[in-house]
Image: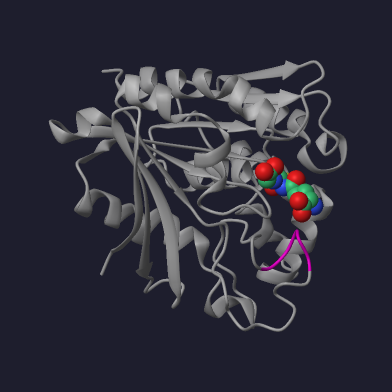
Amino acid sequence: MLQILSEHPCFNGIQAYYRHDSRTTGLPMQFSVFHPPVEEKELVPVLFYLAGLTCTEETFMIKAGAQRIAAQLGIMLVTCDTSPRDTGIPGADQDWDFGHGAGFYLDATEAPWSKHFRMESYVTDELHELIFSEFNADAERTGIFGHSMGGHGALVLALRHPDKYKSVSAFAPVTAPSHCPWGQNAFSRYLGHDGNQWLEHDASALMKHRQTPFPHGILIDQGLGDTFLHEQLLPEQFEQACSAAGQPLTLRRHEGYDHGYYFISTFVEDHLAFHHRVLNAA
Ligand SMILES: N[C@@H](CCC(=O)N[C@@H](CSC=O)C(=O)NCC(=O)O)C(=O)O
C-alpha cells in the first residue's frame, strides 16, 4: 500500500513524497513525484531521475529547480532512493561510495548484498508499474536521466530496457564503471569477479553491442571543473563507444562547472526540453 508522506503545492502542481513496502528489496522504499498541473486532465509523459552517491529521493527535487519547467512542459518527474536502507548488513554504512546510498542501480548477485540490493528490478519493474498504476502517467512516453552514479544508472537501464525508456540523458555520468575505482569497488562486491557480468552493467561496453537503440540521440552534460572527471567519469569512453555503434550523442563539455547541483540546475531545463521533444516525437 502506498503511503503519502507529504504533499506540497509547487508551480500549480504537487510535489509529493511516498513510502511503500517493496517486494523487490524486501524493505520499505521512499520515492518522490512532481505532479504537473495538467496531470489532473490528461495522461502525462514521465521522466525517471536517478541520483548519485549519498543522495536520496529528495536531493534532485530540492536542489535541481526542475519543477517550474516540468510544470510548463507537463512532465511528471519521479525520483527514488539510491539504495535500500536499514538493511542491517554489517558495513553497509561504512563507505559513502558503497552500500547504503550507493546501490549502482543493479541487482546484486553476491551475498550479503543480493537479498536487498536489487535496484535495477526495483526501478524498472516495481516502481515503474506503481507509477503507471497509481498516477495519470503515459507508459508510452517515458524517459530516464540521472547524475553521476545515477547517470550510469540511466544510461545502463535505458540500454538494458529500451522497451521501457524512449529517451535518455545524463549529467556527469559514470560511463565506464568497469574502468574506474567507484565501479570496480562496487561491481566486485555486488557482482563478484566475473568480468562478463560487469560488462552487462557498463554503459560503454553495452553500447558497443547495441545498434542505435535511441534514434533521437542521447544528451550528456559534463563540467570540465569536475574533480571526478578523469578518474571516475571517463566520458570519452562512452563517446568512442557511441561513435563506433553509430549512436547519435550530444556530449557538451562546460568550462569551469563542477560535479554538484549548481551545475545540474544550470542545464536541467535543456534536459527536460530534450526529453519533451523526444517523448512527443511521432
Ligand atoms: N563524499 C562527499 C561527496 C558525495 C558526492 O559528491 N555525491 C554526489 C554524487 S557523486 C556520484 O554519484 C552528489 O550528488 N551529492 C549530493 C549533492 O547534494 O551534491 C559526501 O559524502 O558528501
The picture places residue 180, in percent across and down from the top left corner, at 82, 49
Q: Nearer the viewer, residue 192 or 59?
A: 59
Q: Is residue 12 magenta?
A: no
The scheme the figure's colours follow is: one colour
Above or below — where is 277 with respect to 22? above
Of 43 and 63, nearer the camera is 63
In the image, taking residue 130 as reference, residue 242 lies left or right, namely: right
Q: Residue at x 35, y 27 (%)?
A: 11
Q: Is residue 174 visible?
A: no
The quarter of the picture where residue 10 lies is: top left
Prevailing secondary structure class for the magenta stretch in the rendered image = loop
- Residues 239 and 266: in front is 266
Q: Is residue 235 left or right of residue 31?
A: right
Which span of residues is magenta-colored? 95-99
Q: Quadrant of the N terminus?
A: bottom left
- Of 7 and 2, nearer the camera is 7
Left or right of 92? Residue 224 is right
**x, y percentage for residue 229?**
82, 34
Is residue 232 at least partly visible in the picture? yes
Q: Quadrant of the C terminus?
A: top left
